Image: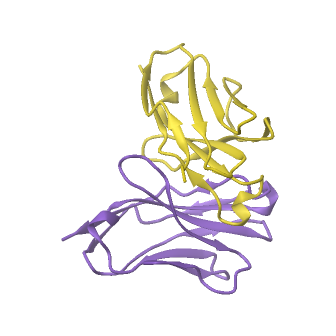
Amino acid sequence: AQKITQTQPGMFVQEKEAVTLDCTYDTSDPSYGLFWYKQPSSGEMIFLIYQGSYDQQNATEGRYSLNFQKARKSANLVISASQLGDSAMYFCAMTGMNSGYSTLTFGKGTMLLVSP
Amino acid sequence: DAGVTQSPTHLIKTRGQQVTLRCSPKSGHDTVSWYQQALGQGPQFIFQYYEEEERQRGNFPDRFSGHQFPNYSSELNVNALLLGDSALYLCASSWGLAGGNTGELFFGEGSRLTVL
């Protein structure tokens, strides 16, 4: 079974500052993938970044980077230079070999509010 | 390049009724998964369709059923609606069953169902 834990119900950050959203996971899969999604109030789940468990380097996508620490089973999302449009719910999710990499297990999410 | 599209975006039903939600996958994708997201929670996996067959199923009752068409689009049907079925229903698409192995899992904007 897989489990995702996001311990921060809400985070506040000022515009242009960096913010880290925490995510820890638990799995028995030898191979797995970790995702971060952004969900604005409209409801759409917007893909941000992906990290495979065997990837040697941490994933980066523009202002998003994933701080992957395999031994600690953590996959924190770092957003650099926050913008007002970054205000949204953020979900960490994972999939794994035992599910055929076809289903996602989500955490409960973190609400990020960016202030001017 | 059209992303994942879902319809309707909002709908209201009463207890005991039946509902059908529709999803068209992202261009080039052939696998569709459905998720239920209750208010304040992360999405939960309902089932996955590939080659017009249900391939995996989450912990949902038989009242939840689906279908995939030859053009890869999909429907989610819920019978005998309960108040607890009120949620955002999200469709995700990928290429092949193991889309999660490459990070290619994209979501639509969802269908928000309210059961009165």
Decide: is A92 above or below A43.
Answer: below
Q: Residue furthest front?
A: B1
The residue at the point 50 percent across, 28 percent down is: B84
Of residues B39 and B88, the one drawn nearer to the viewer in this rendering: B88
Where residue B110 sits in the image (x, y, percent)? 49, 41
Q: Residue at x 61, y 24 (%)?
A: B78
**Chain with yellow colouring:** B
Q: Residue A78, how many percent across, how many down?
A: 45, 78
In the figure, the shade used to draw chain A is purple
* Relative side of A74 to B58, left or right: left
The image quarter in which residue A93 lies: bottom right
Up the image or down, A108 lies above or below B80; here it is below
Residue A25 vs residue B82: left or right? right
Please say which color scheme the image uses.
Answer: by chain
The location of residue B71, given as percent across then percent down, is 71, 37
- Quadrant hosting residue B76: top right
- Please give the name of the residue rendered at 54% of the width and 49% of the height, measured from the top-left corner: B2
Observer-nearest residue: B53 or B43?
Answer: B53
Quadrant position of the C terminus of chain A in the picture:
bottom left
Q: Is residue A12 left or right of residue A71?
A: left
Q: Quadrant of residue B45?
A: top right
* Location of the N terminus of chain A (image quadrant): bottom right
Q: Position of residue B47 (x, y in %)?
A: 70, 40
Total labels: the figure holds: 0
Residue at 64% x, 62% y: name it.
A94
Q: Which residue occupies the extreme top position in the image? A: B16
Residue found at the very far bottom of the displayed protein: A57
